[in-house]
C-alpha cells in the first residue's frame, strides 16, 4: 500500500490532510486492516472542539472498538455522514473515506506529525506487514 | 506416546427452528380446571388498558416445548463436555458438592425478608466467606453485594470517588494499562472519570518510568490486573504501589486473574488498596450462562467507611445482623446482599480445599498453563517470553504468512471438539491466542488440546484454505459476523 505523500500521519493511525486553515481527517489503510470489517463509526457533531492527542470518536469493528485520536486541535466543520450507513467504505478505501473536516486552531501543529515515509517505516516495525 | 481417544469431531446434534415457527393457532400446553371463584370483569377493572390480543405468541404443546429446548441444549458446549480454554475467564470445573450444599433445604428455601433472628445460619455463611476472602486477599474489609466482575469494578470506583471527595479533592483521572480488560476503561468512564492510557514495556509489564511521568494529583487511581492479561506477573508491583501512594492515588486491582495468586501471594501485602474478586472464576461458581456471577470488593481500612450498605456486623448480644447507619456509604449497589446462592458455593469450594488445597490449585493452574506453553512452543509465535502464570498468550504471526489468523484457528479448533480460546485479546498482541486451561484439566485432556493445536498449525502449512473455511463439522458453518453487526435482525417476524 502506498501512503499519500500530501497527508501527515499519527502513531495512532490517523491521517490528516491540511490545506491552509482547514484539514480533513481519516484513518489509515493499516488501521482499517488491523481492525478488520468496520461495522460502526462514531463521530462528533459539527461545532465540536477537538484537542490534539485526545479522542474525538471511535470505530467499531467485528473485533474491537478503537478510539480515534485527533491529529491536531480545531473545530469540526463537517462530518462524513455517509459512513453512518456505509461504514464498509473505510475498509474499501481508507484514504479516500474522510471522517471529519476541521478548522485548525494552529495550522503549524500538523508539520510535527509523521510523513508518509516515516509512517510506513513505523507500521513496518509495529506489525511486520 | 500414550494412545488417546480423540474427542468427537461430530456428535448427535438436533436441528431446530424457532419456537415461533412451530406455532399453530389454538394449540396450548395447559388446561385449566373450571373456574371455582367469582368471575372478574376485566374490562370494567382495566378499561382501555385491557389487552386481548397478545400479538405473535408461540402456541405449542408441552412436549413441543420440552423438545425445543432439549434440542437447543445439544448445541451447547460446556465445561462438563471438555476443556474451555478461554483466557482470563477461568472456566474451571464447578464442583457438584457446591450444588449439593446450595440445595440444602434450609438454604434453598431461605428468604431475604426472613427476620434476622431466624437467618443466623445464612448470615454466618456470609460472615465466614467474607473472612476467608479477606484472609486470601490480605485486605481489611469486604462487600459481597456486587453481582459480577464489572459491577465490582463500578462499586470499587464509586468507593475511590467517595474517598477522594471526603479528602476535599475529587480528582479527575484513572490510569489504565494498554493490556487491561475492556471493562476497566468502560467502568472509569461510567463513573465519570477521564481515562488515561498507560503503555506496557517490552516485558509486557507496566512501564514504571511512564507511570512516574503520568502520575500526578489529578489521578484518582490506577486500575491494574495482576497477573495482567498477558498472564505475566507485574514484578514492579511494590514500586507501582509506592508511586501511586506518594501522590495520594489509590491502587485498584482487577482480580480477574486471581486464580494465579490464591494462597501464594496477597494483593493487600503488595500495596493494593481495593480489588474485586470473581467468585464465578476463581472460586468455582458457575460461569457463562450458568451464573449468576458474584463480584465481591475487598478494601483496605481507609475505604471501609464508604462500603455499600448494609454492612454485616456482630451485634452486642453476639448475633449477626445488618447495619444501615453508614453515613459515608456509597449506598446500596444490589438488592438484599448480593447473589447469596453463589456465596454458599464459593464457601463450599474454599472450605473443601482448605488453605493447602487452594495453594495446590494455584500451583496446578500455573503448571497447566506452562505445560501448554511448552507443548505449543515452536508451532505458534510467543510474543512475550516473560514467564507465564495461569495463562499463556501466543500470536498468529507464523500462520499470518499463509493468510490464516487467530479467528480462523479458533474456528478450526471447534472441529476438534474444543471451545475456542480467547481471540484477538489482549489488544497489545496483534492476532492474540489467549489460552487458560485452569487447574481442572488433566494431562490427557491437555495433550488432546496440544495435539489439536499442533495439527491445525500443520494444516495451515498444507491446506490454509481448509482452515479458512472452518468449522466443517458443526451444525452451521462460518457465520457472517459482519452482516450480523451491520444489518442486525433482532426479532422474528411472520413472513
Image: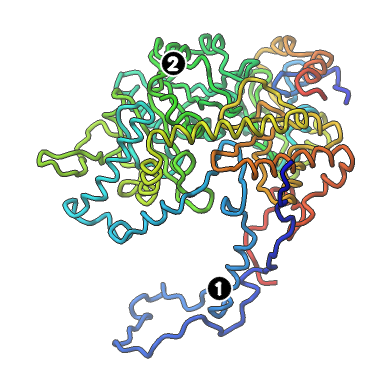
**Mark toward the start of the polypeptide (2 vs 1):** 1
Point 78% across, 29% down: residue: B397
Compared across the picture, whether B231 is left or right of B290 comes to right
Residue to which mark 2 is pinned: B241
The answer as to whether the residues below labels 2 and 1 share one chain is: yes
Mark 2, chain letter? Answer: B
Q: Residues within 10 Å of mark 2 (few under 14, many from 20)?
A: some
| Residue A54 pos. (x, y %) | 60, 22
Q: Count the labels in the image.
A: 2
Q: Quadrant of the C terminus of chain B?
A: bottom right
Residue to which mark 1 is pinned: B66
| Residue B426 pos. (x, y %) | 63, 31
Q: Is residue B77 above or below residue B354?
A: below
Q: Residues within 10 Å of mark 1 (few under 14, many from 20)?
A: few
- Toward the front, the furthest residue is B2
Q: Nearer the viewer, residue B2 or B35?
A: B2
Res. A108 visible in picture: yes
Mark 1, chain letter? Answer: B
Element on which disc 1 rests = helix
Q: Residue B295 has which mark?
A: none
* Contact between labelled residues 1 and 2, with CB atoms less than 8 Å apart: no
Point 55% across, 80% down: residue: B61
Q: Is residue B94 above or below residue B18?
A: above
Q: Is residue B340 above or below residue B127?
A: below
Point 75% across, 51% down: residue: B415
Element on which disc 2 rests = helix
Q: Quadrant of the N terminus of chain B?
A: top right
| Residue A111 pos. (x, y %) | 74, 10
Point 69% across, 24% down: residue: A102
Q: Nearer the viewer, residue B412 or B304?
A: B412
- Toward the left, the furthest residue is B317
Amino acid at each position: 500500500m502506498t501512503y499519500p505523500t500530501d497527508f501527515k500521519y499519527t502513531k495512532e493511525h490517523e491521517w490528516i490532510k491540511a490545506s491552509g486553515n482547514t484539514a480533513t481527517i481519516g484513518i489509515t489503510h493499516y488501521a482499517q486492516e488491523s481492525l478488520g470489517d468496520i461495522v460502526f463509526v462514531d463521530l462528533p457533531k459539527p461545532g465540536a472542539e477537538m484537542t490534539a492527542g485526545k479522542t474525538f470518536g471511535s470505530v467499531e469493528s467485528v473485533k474491537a472498538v478503537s478510539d480515534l485520536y485527533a491529529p491536531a486541535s480545531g473545530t469540526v466543520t463537517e462530518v462524513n455522514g455517509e459512513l453512518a450507513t456505509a461504514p464498509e467504505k473505510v475498509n474499501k478505501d481508507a484514504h479516500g473515506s474522510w471522517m471529519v473536516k476541521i478548522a485548525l486552531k494552529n495550522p503549524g501543529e500538523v508539520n510535527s506529525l509523521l510523513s508518509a515515509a516515516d509512517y510506513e517505516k513505523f507500521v513496518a516495525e509495529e506489525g511486520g506487514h | 506416546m500414550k494412545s488417546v481417544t480423540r474427542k468427537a469431531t461430530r456428535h448427535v446434534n438436533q436441528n431446530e427452528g424457532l419456537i415461533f415457527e412451530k406455532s399453530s393457532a389454538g394449540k396450548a400446553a395447559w388446561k385449566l380446571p373450571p373456574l371455582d371463584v367469582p368471575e372478574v370483569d376485566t374490562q370494567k377493572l382495566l378499561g382501555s388498558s385491557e389487552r386481548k390480543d397478545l400479538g405473535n405468541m408461540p402456541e405449542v404443546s408441552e412436549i413441543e416445548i420440552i423438545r425445543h429446548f432439549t434440542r437447543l441444549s445439544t448445541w451447547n458446549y460446556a465445561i462438563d463436555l471438555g476443556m474451555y480454554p478461554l483466557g482470563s475467564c477461568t472456566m474451571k470445573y464447578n464442583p457438584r458438592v457446591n450444588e449439593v450444599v446450595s440445595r440444602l433445604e434450609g438454604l434453598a428455601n431461605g428468604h431475604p425478608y426472613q427476620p434476622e433472628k431466624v437467618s443466623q445460619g445464612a448470615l454466618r455463611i456470609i460472615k465466614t466467606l467474607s473472612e476467608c476472602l479477606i484472609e486470601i486477599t490480605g485486605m481489611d474489609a469486604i462487600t459481597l453485594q456486587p453481582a459480577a466482575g464489572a459491577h465490582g469494578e463500578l462499586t470499587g470506583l464509586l468507593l475511590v470517588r467517595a474517598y477522594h471527595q471526603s479528602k476535599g479533592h475529587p480528582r479527575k483521572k484513572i490510569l489504565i494499562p494498554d493490556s487491561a480488560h475492556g471493562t476497566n476503561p468502560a467502568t472509569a468512564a461510567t463513573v465519570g472519570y477521564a481515562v488515561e492510557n498507560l503503555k506496557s514495556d517490552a516485558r509486557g509489564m507496566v512501564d514504571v518510568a511512564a507511570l512516574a511521568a503520568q502520575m500526578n494529583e489529578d489521578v484518582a487511581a490506577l486500575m491494574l490486573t495482576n497477573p495482567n492479561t498477558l498472564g505475566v506477573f507485574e514484578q514492579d508491583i511494590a514500586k507501582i504501589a509506592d508511586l501511586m501512594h506518594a501522590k495520594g492515588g489509590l491502587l485498584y486491582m482487577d482480580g480477574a486473574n486471581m486464580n494465579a495468586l490464591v494462597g501464594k501471594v496477597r494483593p493487600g501485602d503488595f500495596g493494593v488498596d481495593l480489588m474485586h474478586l470473581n467468585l464465578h472464576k476463581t472460586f468455582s461458581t458457575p460461569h457463562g450462562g450458568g451464573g449468576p456471577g458474584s463480584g465481591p470488593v475487598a478494601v483496605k481500612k481507609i475505604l471501609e467507611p464508604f462500603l455499600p450498605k448494609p454492612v454485616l456486623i456482630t451485634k452486642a448480644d453476639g448475633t449477626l445482623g445488618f447495619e444501615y447507619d453508614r453515613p459515608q456509604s456509597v449506598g446500596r449497589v444490589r438488592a438484599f446482599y448480593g447473589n447469596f446462592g453463589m456465596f454458599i458455593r464459593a464457601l463450599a469450594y474454599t472450605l473443601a480445599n482448605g488453605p493447602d488445597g487452594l495453594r495446590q490449585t494455584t500451583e496446578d493452574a500455573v503448571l497447566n498453563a506452562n505445560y501448554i506453553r511448552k507443548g505449543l512452543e515452536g508451532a505458534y509465535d510467543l510474543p512475550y517470553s516473560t514467564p507465564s502464570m495461569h495463562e499463556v498468550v501466543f500470536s498468529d504471526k507464523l500462520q499470518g504468512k499463509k493468510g490464516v489468523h487467530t479467528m480462523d484457528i479458533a474456528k478450526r479448533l471447534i472441529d476438534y471438539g474444543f471451545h475456542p480460546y480467547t481471540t484477538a485479546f489482549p489488544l497489545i498482541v496483534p492476532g492474540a491466542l489467549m489460552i487458560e486451561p485452569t487447574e481442572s484439566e488433566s494431562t490427557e485432556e491437555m495433550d488432546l488440546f496440544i495435539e489439536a493445536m499442533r495439527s491445525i498449525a500443520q494444516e495451515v502449512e498444507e491446506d490454509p484454505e481448509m482452515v479458512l473455511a472452518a468449522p466443517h463439522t458443526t451444525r452451521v458453518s462460518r457465520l457472517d459476523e459482519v452482516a450480523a453487526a451491520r444489518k442486525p435482525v433482532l426479532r422474528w417476524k411472520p413472513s
